[in-house]
Image: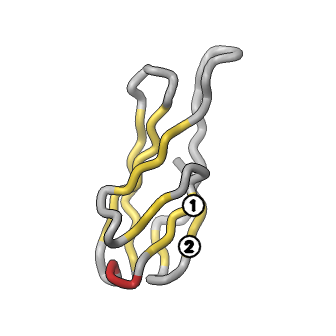
Amino acid sequence: VSGKKSVKAGKTLKLKAKVSAAKKANKKVKWTSSNKKYATVSSSGKVKALKAGKGKKVKITAMATDGSGKKKTVVIKIK
């Protein structure tokens, strides 16, 4: 997972996930936020920091949807 690791409350940032998989395999990921009160994440990896999250840290996870169970988590600090 790549992208900035901090964002101002009320703003957004874009994360990218790279999935290493066999040719023609499902390379999609499912994004999740550890606390939707502080930050949400879209299906495309766009993180929106909510004003209630100012000063908090939220874990954003990208999980492969190919059944492998592989995932990567990053911690985003909300300024």
Circle 1 SS class? strand
Q: Is residue 28 above or below residue 38?
A: above
Residue sitting nearer the eye, 31 or 13:
31
Residue sitting nearer the eye, 35 or 61:
35
Q: Residue at x 54, y 65 (%)?
A: 4
Q: Residue at x 50, y 29 (%)?
A: 65
For residue 77, what is the image quadrant?
bottom left
Residue identifier under label 1:
46
Left or right: residue 42 versus residue 49 is right
Q: Is residue 10 above or below residue 74?
A: below
Residue 30: x and y in percent read: 49, 41
Instruction: Tell me the kind of residue under disc 1.
Output: Lys
Q: How is the image coloured?
A: secondary structure
Alpha carbon separation for disc pair 2 and 1? 7 Å
On residue 12, which mark appears?
2
Instruction: Tell me the kind of residue under disc 2.
Output: Thr
Circle 2 SS class? strand
* Mark toward the start of the polypeptide (2 vs 1): 2
